[in-house]
Amino acid sequence: MQKQISNLDKLTLSNDFLFKHVMLRKRICKHILEELLHTEIADITYLEAEQTIDVYPDSHGIRLDVRIADTANTHYNLEMQVKNPVNRATGKFLLPKRTRYYQAMLDTDMLQKGQDYDELSPTYIIFFCLFDFFQDSQRIYTFKKRCLENVNIELADEAVIMFLNTLGTKGDVSPDIQSLFDYINSNTINSNFTREVADTIVEIKNDKKVRDAYMTYEMRMKDLRDEAHAEGLAEGKAQGLAEGKAEGLAEGKAEGLAEGKAKEKTATAKRLLSMGLSVEDIAKATSLSVEQVEAIKAE
């Protein structure tokens, strides 16, 4: 129990569990959106936080950290991305197509049967990245669809994807956004805004409901690991004994145990993915690499 409490105390804003709870503070989240988009927002409404969207029973669900709508019915999805996931089998980075899938699922979930396409709300998918995906040192990379033959022609589908590079040095951002980047990178408090964020984090960590939720989350992950371990070990032993008939009992057991451990980790990762946990947390829970978890997720 104490170990789980101390784990929460060590979390920083880059952790998606804590990031979600900070973004659920309306004043902070609204201010970030206003500073990023250079606009005034009258109010925001939280849609289901950390929501898993499964539009079709056999579709690949997505877990959303924080989903918001403002009074103009513009929808925002805010995500924390600590690592740059890659498919080890293909060597391709997964983030660009993840944004494509997020957008498709958001739109499908938003548009009810019988509604016209023009009823789709404007959307912003915003990733806070602790790495420079595009290697151009921009603080913000904003993407809209434009015509290749004439870049002045924009496809006005009102869908925007933004990558916030907390390590960036190019491009203008407001002082509060830069101070937020500094705080994410190194916990440096250099503005009234980041002081408010830091104080909010202390308040969140002292909130009994949050502590209970985090301990439940940690214990749930441990139970799943233990369950998968037992299943994988039994399967590994059985397979090892069967193979041992042909190659020798001792060698078969060893191979069976090794394969069992590998299957146990894979089974655990699949269970945690189905629960909507983040790739980074699953990697920590299973001792798999982020890349391995991403490959399992992509299957």
Image (tube, rainbow, N blue to C red):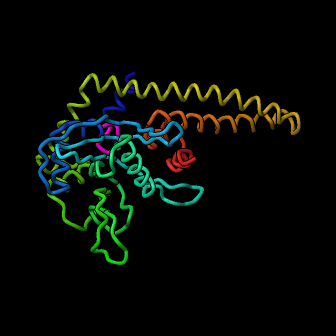
Q: Nearer the viewer, residue 10 or 55?
A: 55
Expressed as whole percent of the image width and height from the top left, the position of residue 299 reads 58, 47
**Residue farthest right in this picture:** 246
Q: Nearer the viewer, residue 277 or 216?
A: 277
**Which of the 4 image quadrants contains residue 5?**
top left
The quadrant of the image that shows the N terminus is top left
Question: Residue shown at 59%/39% (left/top)?
Answer: 266
**Residue farthest front in this picture:** 114
In the rendered view, does 209 fall on the left or right side of 247?
A: left
**Which of the 4 image quadrants contains residue 27?**
top left
How would you classify the magenta stretch by its main secondary structure?
Answer: loop
Look at the picture and state if 21 lies above or below 33: above
Question: Residue shown at 72%/32% (left/top)?
Answer: 236
Expressed as whole percent of the image width and height from the top left, the position of residue 183 reads 23, 49
Expressed as whole percent of the image width and height from the top left, the position of residue 143 reads 32, 62
Question: Residue shown at 81%/31% (left/top)?
Answer: 241
Q: Which residue range is magenta in the image? A: 11-18
Question: Residue shown at 15%/58% (left/top)?
Answer: 174
**Which of the 4 image quadrants contains residue 173?**
bottom left
Residue 256 within the magenta-colored segment of the rendering:
no
Look at the picture and state if 35 lies above or below 169: above
Residue 17 within the magenta-colored segment of the rendering:
yes
Residue 247 in sight in this render: yes
